[in-house]
Image: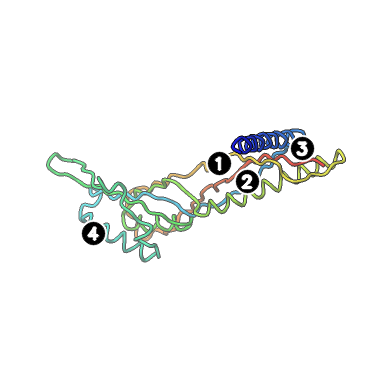
């Protein structure tokens, strides 16, 4: 009885191996067409990370605490969510000492502010300059919906590959069937020429016409390439 069971198991293993071999050979012998599809989308950044530097040495008649208070109050007036979009950079060492005179240490504090449009960035720069805070720079720009745009570009690339495969196969009297294999290149998120906005130090004159600086950020490009094998009928 044991011998019969052992023989049955061995037979099943042989059949399973043979089946796998047949499937592999079937895949290799099928006629197919392999094409690539490319797609990209340029999206506007909606997360602009700015560094604001408050240096005590620039304020002879004001303390750092009073300057900070004015800055925070102004940002809140502009509708900025202070708890969400304003943080102190490098909490472990946010106060840096600058010794202009050996016995007279000065403090510097850096904030990171996130705004959500180029227009809002310009408004912030102008508002801070009016408060005498002119050391402002743009660190980087991002898009909060990047995952959504990645998926849209993937779908567009697949459709492009299918259209190309259909065109080429019909040219030789064939049609395409199911997709047999799909691979994708890693996405690239490219942005270049990001402006570094540095304001000239000094308060605005009372009679000076104030205008919001016109700032434009290059759009972020999301792109991908897919490679697809379609069955050829």
Q: Mark 4 = which residue? A: 66
Residue 96 place in picture, x, y as percent: 23, 44
Residue 4 picture quarter: top right
Contact (Cβ within 8 Å) of mark 2 with mark 4? no
Element under label 3? strand
| 7 relative to 92 in the view: left or right | right
**Could you tell me how far apart the alpha carbons at marks 3 and 1 are, in whole angstroms?**
29 Å
Depth check, front residue: 203 or 32: 32
Instruction: Residue under label 2, please give it.
Output: 40
Which residue is denoted by mark 3 in the rendering?
A: 32
Secondary structure type for disc 4: helix
Of tags 2 and 3, which is closer to the observer? 3
The correct choice, above or below, for 22 with respect to 87 in the image is above
Can you give x and y, in whole percent of width and height, for residue 11 in the image? Answer: 67, 35
Among numbered discs 2 and 4, the one appearing first in the sequence:
2
Asked which secondary structure carries label 2, the reply is strand
Q: CA separation, marks 4 and 1?
A: 44 Å
| Separation of residues labelled 2 and 4 (CA atoms) | 48 Å
Decide which of 3, 84 is in the foreground and name it: 3
Count residues near mark 2 (Cα–Cα under 10 Å), then give few for <14, some for 14-19, many for 20+: many
**Circles 4 and 3: CB atoms closer than 8 Å:** no
Q: Which residue is found at the position 57% from the left and 51% from the top?
A: 43
Q: Are marks 2 and 3 in contact (CB under 8 Å)?
A: no
Label 1 SS? strand
- Circle 3 packing at 10 Å, graded few (<14), some (14-19), many (20+), is many
Q: CA distance from mark 1 to mark 2?
A: 10 Å
């Amino acid at each position: 009885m044991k011998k019969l069971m052992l023989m049955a198991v061995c037979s099943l293993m042989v059949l399973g191996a043979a089946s796998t071999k047949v499937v592999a050979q079937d895949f290799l012998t099928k006629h197919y067409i392999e094409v690539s599809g490319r797609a990209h989308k340029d999206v506007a950044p909606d997360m602009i990370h700015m560094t604001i530097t408050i240096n005590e040495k620039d304020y002879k008649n004001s303390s750092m605490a009073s300057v900070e208070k004015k800055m925070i109050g102004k940002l809140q007036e502009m509708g900025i969510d202070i708890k969400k979009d304003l943080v102190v950079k490098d909490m472990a060492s946010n106060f840096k000492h600058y010794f202009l005179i050996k016995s007279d240490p000065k403090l510097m504090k850096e904030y990171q502010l996130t705004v959500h449009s180029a227009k809002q960035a310009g408004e912030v720069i102008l508002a801070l300059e009016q408060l005498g805070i002119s050391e402002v720079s743009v660190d980087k720009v991002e898009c909060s919906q990047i995952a959504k745009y990645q998926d849209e570009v993937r779908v567009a690339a697949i459709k492009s590959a299918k259209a190309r495969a259909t065109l080429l196969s019909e040219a030789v009297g064939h049609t395409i069937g199911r997709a047999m294999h799909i691979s994708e290149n890693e996405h690239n998120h490219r942005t270049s020429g990001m402006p570094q906005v540095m304001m000239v130090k000094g308060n605005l004159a009372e009679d000076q016409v104030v205008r919001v600086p016109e700032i434009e950020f290059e759009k972020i490009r999301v792109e991908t390439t897919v490679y697809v094998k379609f069955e050829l009928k």
